Amino acid sequence: MDTLPKHGRIDCNRCFKDSAPVEFDQHKTGDSGWRITANPLAWGNAEPQVVVLGFSKGPTQAGALANTPHNEIAYKGSRKNVAKILSHVGVLNIPASADPVTAVDRAIADTGGRFHFGSLIRCTVERYDDKSGTWKGSGGGMLDKFVATCFGRTVASNCVREHLANLPGKTRLVVMFGLGTKLNYVRESFKLYSEVRPGNWRWINDVAYTDGNVVVVHVEHFASQGALIPNWLGSTGHERARLGQQARDAVEAAQVP
């Protein structure tokens, strides 16, 4: 099926085959200090030009599932940064007089627009923190450490096979939030795409790759702390700015209408 999941809750139990029926946001499965919760979601168009993916729903988003309207969950609390990043790479046009958050609000809610929004891992990912004795959905190295584990790679492979292996013909670009430690997340994601989505995959630059049909571009994560986002958005003089420029170059190469 050459479409992405439709706007709303996703009917998927690929990682929960031993649990039938799977109850949304209740069933969990995991291994080696990692777990996922069955709460896959999607926003926007199922046949878009551009797919925008976080890694997984963080605690702010996952904690809002029970009492927040669907259109307000994605990137909750970080939409201003989402606007800055997507505008920087040239996929979201925000007029100078417009509110950037409102622009993202509208794009997320638009089921007939140019965007599809979601996450690489559609369910919520958490890891167990020994020090606090709690499960956490955020923290340093979360992205690359998860996909580097056997459990994480299985879950990620399931998600890509189910939702990204057969993209609509009009989809030319996948924007992925997150670079990982020393670009580890970028490299692990390249391996994942090339294994699950057959094709002649090649690198465009340090943060982007393509199979000749779709371009995948990694950008700064919208929840990055400190100077990471400002440095990535900068024009010159910083390594992070170079990665931001490479992302812009790769988006331009995708030739999205």
Image (cartoon, rainbow, N blue to C red):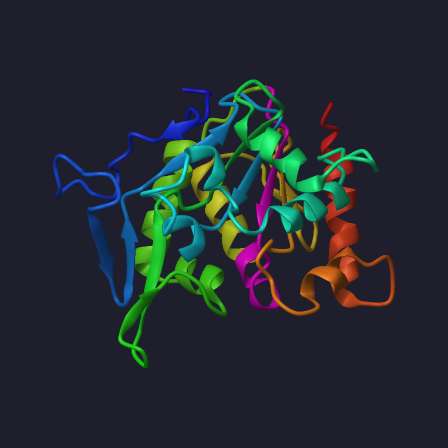
Could one spot residue 50 in this view of the protein? yes
Q: From the image, which quarter does the N terminus lie in?
A: top left
Left or right: residue 165 versus residue 101 is left
Q: Nearer the viewer, residue 53 or 157?
A: 53
Pinpoint residue 167: horizontal percent, then vertical percent: 50, 26
Looking at the image, is 120 positioned above or below residue 236? above
Q: Which residue in the rendered view is the most extreme toward the bottom?
A: 131
- Residue at 86 percent across and 67 percent down: it is 237
Residue 32 image-quadrant placement = bottom left
Q: What number of labels is visible?
A: 0
Pinpoint residue 21: horizontal percent, then vertical percent: 13, 34
- Residue at 75 percent across and 54 percent down: it is 244
Left or right: residue 185 versus residue 23 is right
Pinpoint residue 37: horizontal percent, then vertical percent: 28, 49
Residue 83 image-quadrant placement = top right
Looking at the image, is 127 positioned above or below residue 166? below
Q: Nearer the viewer, residue 225 or 172?
A: 225
Q: Check if residue 183 falls in the magenta segment.
A: yes
Left or right: residue 103 versus residue 153 is right
Left or right: residue 25 versus residue 164 is left
Residue 253 image-quadrant placement = top right
Could one spot residue 164 in this view of the protein? no
- Residue at 46 percent across and 21 percent down: it is 3
Looking at the image, is 111 positioned above or below residue 146? above
* Range covered by the magenta-colored residues: 170-186
